[in-house]
């Protein structure tokens, strides 16, 4: 095999994942909090877990990592 064939066979294993913004997370938490009355009280815990992710998302935007190649 030549070098060109090896490069062609190499698959891209890394994918860029775009995280949702903090406001979208807040709206999702509010929707889950609303659903606790409509569907089931366990949605309260889902809303709390979503809100606990906000500091992580905000810190990720404030302190971005350098891309390593």
Image (tube, rainbow, N blue to C red):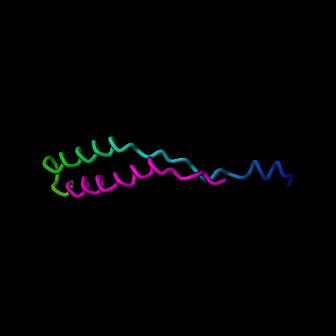
At 67% from the left and 51% from the top, the residue drawn is 11
Q: Is residue 49 magenta?
A: yes
Q: Residue at the far front: name it.
A: 62
Q: Is residue 57 left or right of residue 65?
A: left
Residue 57's spot in the image, x, y percent? Answer: 40, 50
At 54% from the left and 47% from the top, the residue drawn is 16
Q: Is residue 62 left or right of residue 47?
A: right
Q: Nearer the viewer, residue 51 or 16?
A: 51
Q: Nearer the viewer, residue 38 or 30?
A: 30
Q: Residue at the far right: name it.
A: 2
Q: Nearer the viewer, residue 47 or 53?
A: 53
At 39% from the left and 55% from the top, the residue drawn is 56
Q: Quadrant of residue 53?
A: bottom left
Q: Residue at the far left: name it.
A: 37
Magenta segment's dominant SS is: helix
Q: Quadrant of residue 42?
A: bottom left
Quadrant (top left/top right/bottom left/bottom right) for the N terminus = bottom right
Count of marks overlaid on the render:
0
Q: Which stretch did the figure color magenta? A: 44-69
Residue 54's spot in the image, x, y percent? Answer: 34, 51
Q: Is residue 53 magenta?
A: yes
- Looking at the image, residue 59 lies above or below residue 27: below
Residue 14's spot in the image, x, y percent? Answer: 59, 52
Residue 2's spot in the image, x, y percent? Answer: 86, 52
């Amino acid at each position: 095999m030549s070098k060109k064939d090896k490069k062609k066979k190499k698959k891209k294993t890394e994918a860029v994942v775009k995280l949702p913004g903090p406001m979208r997370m807040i709206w999702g938490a509010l929707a889950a909090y609303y659903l606790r009355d409509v569907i089931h009280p366990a949605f309260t815990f889902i809303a709390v877990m979503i809100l606990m992710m906000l500091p992580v998302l905000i810190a990720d935007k404030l302190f971005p990592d350098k891309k390593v190649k």
